[in-house]
Every structure is written in structure tokens, then in C-alpha cells.
């Protein structure tokens, strides 16, 4: 199966994380560990404004020894860990896929975080990277460690499992030749030359939230190296079974959560003239989390849902909210105090 290099985008709460799990299992054959409820062979990271190339690839950090002296240790970043795991599968002759998941891709400076790794996103027909990228000796050692070898750099010479690299290289090459493992030979040769490429068994899936104004811009050169998939907002044609059991309780009244979600999205779409980037300003089934009684509380409606509408959806123009509630809204308190009326008005809203 071909690797996946895709960015998922859509409204908050539409289940982009669930979609990643679905893709991993159905398209990449990656299993779900029932005990940990997490995907096997998967490395996950979240970009943020302080996240750097060093976090993504690797960095030296000081470490205090038992006698009080300080030494520096190289820590592999999320990309090197995923790459090393993929290389190990190839060397071992396994057909298992590896997945690198990047949440909130555009909350960090993606171009700076990827750095030269950006070139590796171009892939050939055989699904290997079109180009190779040179790494430092320490980074190559980090990859070997991610491949579960005991690796170290000693006086400009790399040692693997206590063996000189040249000897390790010859023994491993002979073994790979015996098994006719050409992909493994390709990995080994690249590492010998301090080079890396992204192999066919390594997929990368990222999520972005374009409705968030406090984000970094993704340039067109970066965007075109990915497939894109829009995770659609909820609609009545498909309501998940879990969602059908969730209620919204306001005072002594109870409503269906799915009704509120669908009606609210109708209201948002009907007022698209007042909204920028309408595609991901709607809300998803999982925008609010139900409590143990399958209930969405008044507090969640007032403090999270209404604030999102006030601060993100209708941030530039409050007139649709004022028209709905028939009241002038100056402050957020004016709006949030009407949460009960708001829910009723939304449930009764007739799209036009």
C-alpha cells in the first residue's frame, strides 16, 4: 500500500483525530493497541510557537552525572524517531508501516521546523523521497538509536552495538544481500554516507485549524507537497450512535445534542456574510465533551460554546447574534447570560 502524506482540516470537534485513527487502521494496516488505546508504530507530536527544528529532528541537552559533572546527550526528535522506526522495519524485512502524526501543524512555523527535511516531502514513483538530505554525525547516531541499536560517536567514528561502524556495515550488508533486501541496502548505504530519505513505509498525517487566527502561514510550496482532506461538519444524513445518546440539559429542559449541533451549524452558514472562512467555523459532534451521564452541561454551553461563537465565529460582526436574541450585545457577559434563550432560539431556528 502506498504511503500517505496528507493534511486534514475542518471545523473544531469534527473528529480529525478519529479520522487519523481510521486512516491508519484501514489504509496503512496499523493496529490499535487495545490496552493503551493508541496506534502501534506511531509517533505523535504537536506543533506550537516554541517548537523548533531541534525538537523535530534532535538536539543536545546537558545532563548531570552522578559525580556532579555535566555531559551533553543527544535526544532524537519526533521525526528522527519515526524515521528510525521505519528504517528498522525495512532492515528487519518487515512490511509494517510507520506513521508520524503532527497535530496543529500551522501553530508552529512549519517551514522553519522542517528546515532541510522539507526537501524530503517530494516523492518518486517508488514512494521514496526524490532527494537526499545530509545530516550531522550526531543525528545519524540518533537514527541508529531510534532503530534500537546502541550507537555512539567516538572520536569521529561511529560505533554500533560496541562494533566499529565499518565492521557493522560489512556484516549488515552481507546479511541484507543474503535476504535480497534491496530497500534495506538502500537505507544502510544512505546512513553510511550520512544521508537520509523518507522511505515508502513512513507516512505523515497532519492536522490544521485554519479558523485559528493566531497561526503561522503555510506557503504554497509547502502546501503542494501534501494531499488535503476536508473533514466535513455534521449533518443529519449521518449521526454517530454515541452522539444520539447525548443530551443538553438547560434548567428543567432537555434537548438532543445532535439537534443543537446541526441547528447551530445551519445558523452559522445562514450568516456566512458576517463570517470569514466559513468552512471551518462550524462545530463538530465532539466540540463539547459529555459528562459521565452523557450530558452536556450548562457550564459547557455558556463557557465554551458561546465564547467560541463570540470570540471566533462572530468576532467581527455581532449583528447575527443580536438579531437572533433580539437584544443589543455590548459585552460577552450580555451574550453569555442569555445562554438558555440562545439554546431555545437555535433549536427553533429555521434556515433561510
Image (cartoon, rainbow, N blue to C red):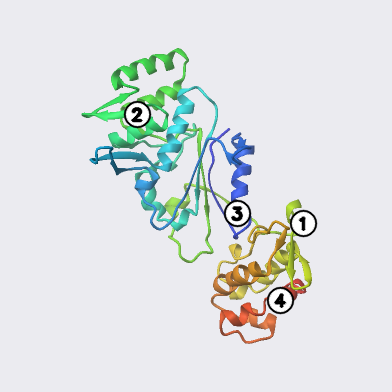
The residue tagged 2 is 191
Q: Nearer the viewer, residue 282 or 340?
A: 340
The residue tagged 3 is 230
Rendered position, 322 above or below 152: below
Q: Which of 130 and 208 is in front in this view?
A: 208
**Element under disc 1:** helix
Considering every residue shown, the one lying at the far front of the view is: 67
- Please tell me which of labels 3 and 2 falls first in the chain: 2
The residues tagged by marks 1 and 4 sit, at their Cα atoms, a distance apart of: 21 Å
The residues tagged by marks 3 and 1 sit, at their Cα atoms, a distance apart of: 24 Å
- Please tell me which of labels 1 and 4 falls first in the chain: 1
Q: In this view, does 153 lie to the left or right of 290?
A: left
The residues tagged by marks 3 and 4 sit, at their Cα atoms, a distance apart of: 32 Å
Residue 73 seen by the camera: yes
Sort mark 2 into few (<14), some (14-19) or many (20+) by Cα contacts within 10 Å.
many
**Element under disc 3:** strand
Query: Could you say which quadrant of the image residue 135 lies in?
Result: top left
Query: Could you say which quadrant of the image residue 342 lies in?
Result: bottom right
Considering every residue shown, the one lying at the far left of the view is: 155
Residue 340 marker: 4
Q: Residue at x 38, y 37 (%)?
A: 131
- Please tell me which of labels 3 and 4 falls first in the chain: 3
The residue tagged 1 is 244
Sort mark 3 into few (<14), some (14-19) or many (20+) by Cα contacts within 10 Å.
few
Rendered position, 311 above or below 74: below
Q: In this view, does 202 lie to the left or right of 194?
A: right
Amino acid at each position: 500500500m502506498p504511503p500517505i502524506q496528507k493534511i486534514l482540516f475542518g471545523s473544531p470537534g469534527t473528529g480529525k483525530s478519529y479520522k487519523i485513527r481510521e486512516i491508519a487502521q484501514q489504509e496503512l494496516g496499523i493496529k490499535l493497541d487495545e490496552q493503551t488505546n493508541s496506534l502501534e508504530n506511531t509517533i505523535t507530536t504537536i506543533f506550537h510557537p516554541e517548537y523548533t527544528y531541534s525538537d523535530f529532528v534532535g538536539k543536545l541537552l546537558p545532563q548531570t552525572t552522578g559525580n556532579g559533572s555535566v555531559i551533553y546527550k543527544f535526544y532524537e526528535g519526533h521525526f528522527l524517531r519515526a524515521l528510525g522506526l521505519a528504517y528498522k522495519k525495512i532492515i528487519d524485512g518487515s512490511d509494517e508501516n510507520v506513521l508520524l502524526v503532527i497535530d496543529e501543524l500551522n501553530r508552529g512555523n512549519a517551514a522553519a521546523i522542517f528546515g532541510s527535511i522539507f526537501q524530503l516531502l517530494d516523492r518518486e514513483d517508488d514512494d521514496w523521497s526524490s532527494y537526499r538530505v545530509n545530516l550531522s554525525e550526531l543525528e545519524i547516531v540518533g537514527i541508529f538509536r531510534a532503530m534500537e541499536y546502541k550507537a555512539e560517536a567516538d572520536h569521529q567514528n561511529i560505533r554500533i552495538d560496541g562494533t566499529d561502524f565499518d565492521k557493522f556495515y560489512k556484516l549488515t550488508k552481507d546479511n541484507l544481500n543474503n535476504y535480497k533486501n534491496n530497500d534495506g541496502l538502500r537505507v544502510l548505504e544512505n546512513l553510511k554516507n550520512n544521508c537520509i530519505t523518507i522511505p515508502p513505509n513512513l507516512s505523515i498525517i497532519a492536522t490544521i485549524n485554519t479558523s485559528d487566527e493566531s497561526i503561522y502561514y503555510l506557503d504554497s510550496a509547502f502546501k503542494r507537497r501534501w494531499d488535503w482532506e476536508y473533514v466535513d461538519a455534521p449533518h443529519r444524513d449521518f449521526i454517530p450512535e454515541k452522539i444520539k445518546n447525548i443530551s443538553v440539559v438547560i434548567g428543567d429542559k432537555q434537548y438532543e445534542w445532535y439537534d443543537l449541533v446541526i441547528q447551530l451549524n445551519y445558523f452559522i452558514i445562514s450568516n456566512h456574510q458576517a463570517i470569514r472562512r466559513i468552512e471551518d467555523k462550524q462545530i463538530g459532534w465532539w466540540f463539547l465533551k459529555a459528562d459521565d451521564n452523557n450530558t452536556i452541561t450548562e457550564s459547557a454551553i455558556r463557557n465554551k460554546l458561546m465564547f467560541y461563537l463570540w470570540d471566533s465565529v462572530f468576532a467581527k460582526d455581532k449583528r447575527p447574534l443580536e438579531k437572533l436574541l433580539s437584544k443589543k450585545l455590548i459585552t460577552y457577559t450580555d451574550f453569555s447570560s442569555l445562554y438558555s434563550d440562545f439554546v431555545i432560539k437555535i433549536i427553533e431556528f429555521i434556515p433561510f
